[in-house]
Image: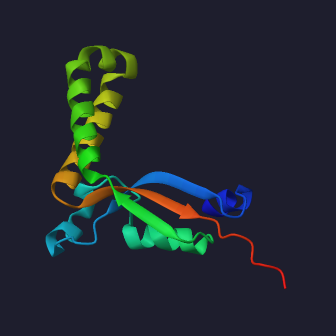
Amino acid sequence: MLRACRRVLKPGGRISYFNIFISEELSPEQRRNIGKLTPPGLYTRAQQQGLLRTAGFVPIEQTDVTDEFLRVQRALLEANERHAKSLGRALGKAQFEERQEGRRRTLRGIEGGAIKRALFVAERPGREPRT
């Protein structure tokens, strides 16, 4: 997908997106229990930057937004709990509970330092000058 994004950008064009990634500062115990602490399918920050470089993006900037992510996840979990009855009817009780458990797992991961969120911004290199 990143290569397709690069193809449609003009030289000098930029891509930006938020992404959740696995913290590189995990303890050995957290690494063993990573499946209990994070949603599935996450990369590390270095892997995410590697994907951007492989797709041909440079320079790559990253801004940590983990604190804001934590606040939003807590607020979302609490709001959904307040409306559990109507959401359970709309989604089905099992699906509602599954989503809430995913939010709880995300919160545990953020609070435990296992996952972070960042804004990634990268640029398609400009054209090389002709000689």
Vertical placement of residue 85 versus 7, above or below: above
Q: Left or right: where does residue 76 sit relative to residue 18?
A: left
Q: Residue at x 63, y 72 (%)?
A: 56
Picture quarter with the C terminus: bottom right
Report x, y in % for residue 66: 27, 52
Q: Left or right: where does residue 20 sit relative to residue 52?
A: left
Give the image quarter of residue 11.
Answer: bottom right
> Looking at the image, how many numbered discs can be counted on the residues?
0
Report x, y in % for residue 120: 45, 59
Of residues 112 and 124, the one nearer the viewer is: 124
Vertical placement of residue 85 versus 105, above or below: above
Of residues 57 and 87, the one nearer the viewer is: 57
Q: Residue at x 49, y 68 (%)?
A: 60
Report x, y in % for residue 57: 59, 69
Vertical placement of residue 35 versus 82, above or below: below
Of residues 108 and 60, the one nearer the viewer is: 60
Give the image quarter of residue 15.
Answer: bottom right
The residue sitting at the right extreme is: 131
Q: Residue at x 30, y 14 (%)?
A: 86
